[in-house]
């Protein structure tokens, strides 16, 4: 159930609390688990998972049934193919296993709490760290973890490297060698589905994740709740989500005390003279909650990525009046055509920013793409400060003013 982000008094909830007996109709296609197209309905008590729309949880007879459904959206593009779906049955180790028949036919069975965990993306590492169970990680995507301990163990071979999920399926030899109880895997490509089926055939249950498919940024945080169910840290997971939600509420209230401003969030892509322009969905919600109009914003659409590829000409036509502009991320090309930049209000008035992302001083890693995924309050705090100069106090975490040579238009006016 998705709860609207409102004030603390209006948002009183106990995460994962029992609601009422409810019959949840689902139509599932396989996402590596062999679930039939129409397994029927799931009866049980719905567990409240605030902000989550991509997954839901039902409890019956002491175990939990998790249904996951989302489209795989190409980077900067649209959904390709049908929605991907999975059904997981989480059974405590001291409970008799249910028969995987009827509405559980073909579901993935996972004994909880899991003790040995493989992950293929850095936000998963952040979620497990937030719950204090990072010591259960036995395999990671690679050796660029932001966490010093995980990175050291990956480089030394103490834990396995199975490949990062956004561009490749897991390396099976390394995965089997890790002997995980479960693989928590980002599904970033439809071709990965058959590889996940292979993983399941080897006796390793797969938890497919579609974190970026959540329509609101707090939905990404809600995946910590699923990690809590898997690891036996439900109370800690609920407390974490509530803490982030309360801080988001505080920042939203603070931003509303200031005049509404406008923001352009567009990064230059040197290939083809194009810009990755944030327009919709979870990222756009951050800017709206900072009391800002998103220039070139578009209607939310879960079948589209948060950004679109637009030309410099389009920006010059429709975006020059933005009060502030974030125009590059940690690894994107810096656009340096001053003749073009000088036509933008944000450049002329010194509200041009970039996103260093808090780089690790000794590793090829950035916190914004790890812990930043589940701490939107940290991102929102920077955006609020950028947009509203009266609120600029303390250190920047992920954003920084863009700097130019002394004496140039826009220099030093932060």
Image: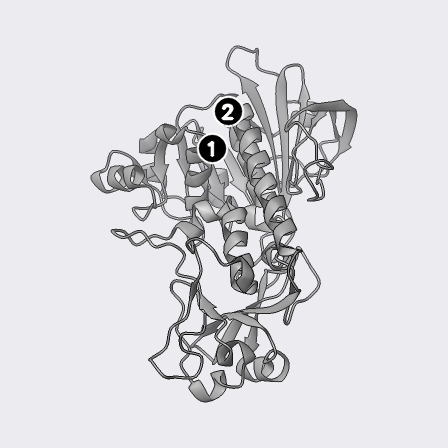
Say what secondary structure mark 1 lies in.
Answer: helix
Q: Quadrant of residue 86?
A: top right
Q: Which residue is mark 2?
A: 233
Q: Nearer the viewer, residue 382 or 315?
A: 382
**Residue 344 higher or lower than 146, as above or below:** below
Q: Nearer the viewer, residue 217 or 239?
A: 239
* Residue 307: x %, y % from top left: 57, 65
**Residue 409 higher or lower than 256, as above or below:** below
Q: Dots 1 and 2: beta carbons under 8 Å?
A: no
Residue 177 numbered mark, or none: none
Q: By what rule are the colours in the image chosen? A: one colour
**Residue 178 higher or lower than 97, as above or below:** below
Q: Quadrant of the C terminus?
A: bottom left
Q: Residue at x 46, y 68 (%)?
A: 353
Q: Quadrant of the N terminus?
A: top right
Q: Which residue is mark 1?
A: 201
Q: Residue at x 43, y 56 (%)?
A: 398
**Residue 288 higher or lower than 153, as above or below:** below
Nearest to the eye among marks 1 and 2: give it: 2
* Residue 131: x %, y % from top left: 46, 30
Residue 99 visible in rendering: no
**Residue 350 placement, left or right of 258:** left
The disc, 1 or 2, on the residue closer to the chain's N-terminal end is 1
**Residue 25 placement, left or right of 76:** right
* Residue 40: x %, y % from top left: 75, 31
Per the model, the C-alpha gap separating discs 1 and 2 is: 28 Å
């Amino acid at each position: 159930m998705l709860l609207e982000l409102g004030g603390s008094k209006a948002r009183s909830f106990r995460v994962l609390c029992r609601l009422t007996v409810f019959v949840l109709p689902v139509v599932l296609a396989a996402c590596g688990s062999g679930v039939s197209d129409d397994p029927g309905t799931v009866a049980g008590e719905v567990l409240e998972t605030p902000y989550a729309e991509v997954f839901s949880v039902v409890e019956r007879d002491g175990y939990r049934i998790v249904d996951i459904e989302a489209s795989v959206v190409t980077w900067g593009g649209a959904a390709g193919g049908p929605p991907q779906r999975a059904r997981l049955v989480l059974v405590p180790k001291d409970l008799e296993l249910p028969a995987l028949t009827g509405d559980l036919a073909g579901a993935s069975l996972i004994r909880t709490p899991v003790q040995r965990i493989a992950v293929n993306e850095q936000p998963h590492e952040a979620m497990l760290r937030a719950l204090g169970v990072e010591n259960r990680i036995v395999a990671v995507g690679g050796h660029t973890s932001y966490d010093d301990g995980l990175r050291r163990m990956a480089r030394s071979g103490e834990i396995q490297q199975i490949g990062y999920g956004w561009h490749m399926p897991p390396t099976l030899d390394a995965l089997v060698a890790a002997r995980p109880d479960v693989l928590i895997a980002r599904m970033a490509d439809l071709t990965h589905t058959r590889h996940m089926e292979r993983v399941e055939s080897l006796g390793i249950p797969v938890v497919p994740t579609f974190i970026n498919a959540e329509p609101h940024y707090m939905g990404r945080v809600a995946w910590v709740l699923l990690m809590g169910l898997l690891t036996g840290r439900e109370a800690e997971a609920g407390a974490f989500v509530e803490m982030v939600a309360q801080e988001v509420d505080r920042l939203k209230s603070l931003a509303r005390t200031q005049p509404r401003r406008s923001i352009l969030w567009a990064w230059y892509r040197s290939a083809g003279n194009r810009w990755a322009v944030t327009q919709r969905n979870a990222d756009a919600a951050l800017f709206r909650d900072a009391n800002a109009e998103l220039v070139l914003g578009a209607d939310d659409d879960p079948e589209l990525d948060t950004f679109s590829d637009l030309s410099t000409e389009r920006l010059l036509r429709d975006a020059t009046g933005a009060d502030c502009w974030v125009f590059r991320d940690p690894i994107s090309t810096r656009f340096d055509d001053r003749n073009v930049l000088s036509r933008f209000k944000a450049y002329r008035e010194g509200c041009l920013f970039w996103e260093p992302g808090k780089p690790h001083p000794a590793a090829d890693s950035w916190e914004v793409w790890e812990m930043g995924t589940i701490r939107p309050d940290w991102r929102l705090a920077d955006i609020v400060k950028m947009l509203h100069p009266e609120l600029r106090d303390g250190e920047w975490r992920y954003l920084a003013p863009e700097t130019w040579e002394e004496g140039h238009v826009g220099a030093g006016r932060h």
